[in-house]
Image (cartoon, rainbow, N blue to C red):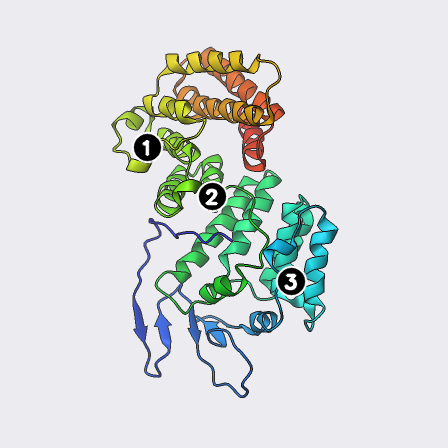
Amino acid sequence: MEFGFVGIGLNLKLNSVRSSNGACALKKPFICMVAKPRQESKPHAAGSYFSTDHFEVSAAPFESAALHKLPAVSEYKGDSLQDDLSVVQKYAKDLDNAERSPIVNFLNGCLFQNHGDFGKARESFNRAIQYGMQHIPDVYERLSSVVFSSGDVNEAENFSKQAIQVRSEVVGNPEHIYNWFSDTFAESVPKWTGKPWSLQRGIIHYLAGNFTHARESLVVSALANLPESSVNSEYAMWDLASLAHSKGVSKVKTERLTQEELACAPDALCELLELFRETDIEHAQDMVESIEYQLEKQNLSAIEHKVAAQQRFYLGLYFDAFLIPNAKAESVREELIRKRNTLLLSATQLGLDNVLNTASEILIHKGK
């Protein structure tokens, strides 16, 4: 599971007070876990319910799930969907009314997603929310990814915003149920195999045309909080592309960049990152020719194909952010769009990950 930093730009007020009975009383939209008198000695989560001015939600479904031996991540082999689902089914047989268990539905959704059955993944995640996971941000992050895979950028962005909203409830609220959920189920949830959620959110915001939110997600959520090994040049290129769109290409050179943006992660995209920072059109053309030459080499390994695909994609992104918006002549603009789409299409043919593949299709469609 990935637990991300909420980020700046939400205008959060972390003012908490204690009510006369000692319960946590946080201003909306925060959620407090409030201790409820217990009639029996069975194990409980950190408090029996959490509430705001508008609702009170029982944590019982989570508590019941935690009373039984949870599956371990190592039990999901990934070889077949049915084998992985059987791990959850074995766990679920000990639960009462397992089909209404938010945990069972969430675990099933993760497995469907990992195996590419996005329709069933979405159904499972929706049931998890219906039965008690309204205030667990992970389910909204995964729903955003599932919906994005179908090409629906606007709905994917809505789910991303819901995830951020729920994460804002956790800030300054140690008794929020998500903290207990994370500790309890972290070793049972199938591994997230996509891009880090903060990077995924930034890409989705960019494609939706929401460049300010894209930069907030990429710079604040990701670079300030992720382990160094998780941060690569992709963050900075999406960030700089968003900056070029929101403030203009000329601002990319004059904007005071963070150390993370100035530093290049040790990956195959460093040269392209230099291109994004320099906004050098001639350099762009040289790089296109260089990459095309490299692709003519015979017997590329699988890794080299992956690198070539990424290079072509990010050259296409460079055209999208830096060249096309500034083309003064319509004929020049049309040629740049054609060049961008050719790069993106060839990147897709070489093999991109799911997020970049979807992004490529959306960018190509934008130019039609």
Q: Position of residue 326 (x, y in %)?
A: 38, 20
User: Dot 2: what SS?
Assistant: helix
User: Dot 3: what SS?
Assistant: helix
Check contact, mark 3 vs mark 1: CB within 8 A.
Answer: no
Query: From the viewer's perspective, is 345 left or right of 240?
Result: right
Q: Tell me what residue is drawn at x 44 percent, y 20 percent.
A: 324
Residues 97 and 194: in front is 194
Residues 138 and 1: in front is 1
Q: Determine the residue located farthest toward the bottom in the rendered image.
A: 39
Q: Is residue 282 visible?
A: yes
Three-letter code, disc 3: Val
Q: Position of residue 132 (x, y in %)?
A: 57, 66
Three-letter code, disc 1: Ala
Check contact, mark 2 vs mark 3: CB within 8 A.
Answer: no
Q: Which residue is mark 2?
A: 201
Q: Nearer the viewer, mark 2 or mark 3?
A: 3
Q: Which residue is mark 3?
A: 104
Residues 27 and 1: in front is 1
Q: Is residue 368 visible?
A: no
Q: Tell me what residue is drawn at x 46 percent, y 73 percent.
A: 46
Mark 2 or 1 closer to N-term?
A: 2
Q: Position of residue 246 (x, y in %)?
A: 36, 33
Residues 174 and 271: in front is 271
Three-letter code, disc 2: Arg
Q: Position of residue 49 (x, y in %)?
A: 49, 75
Query: What number is the disc on residue 263?
Result: 1
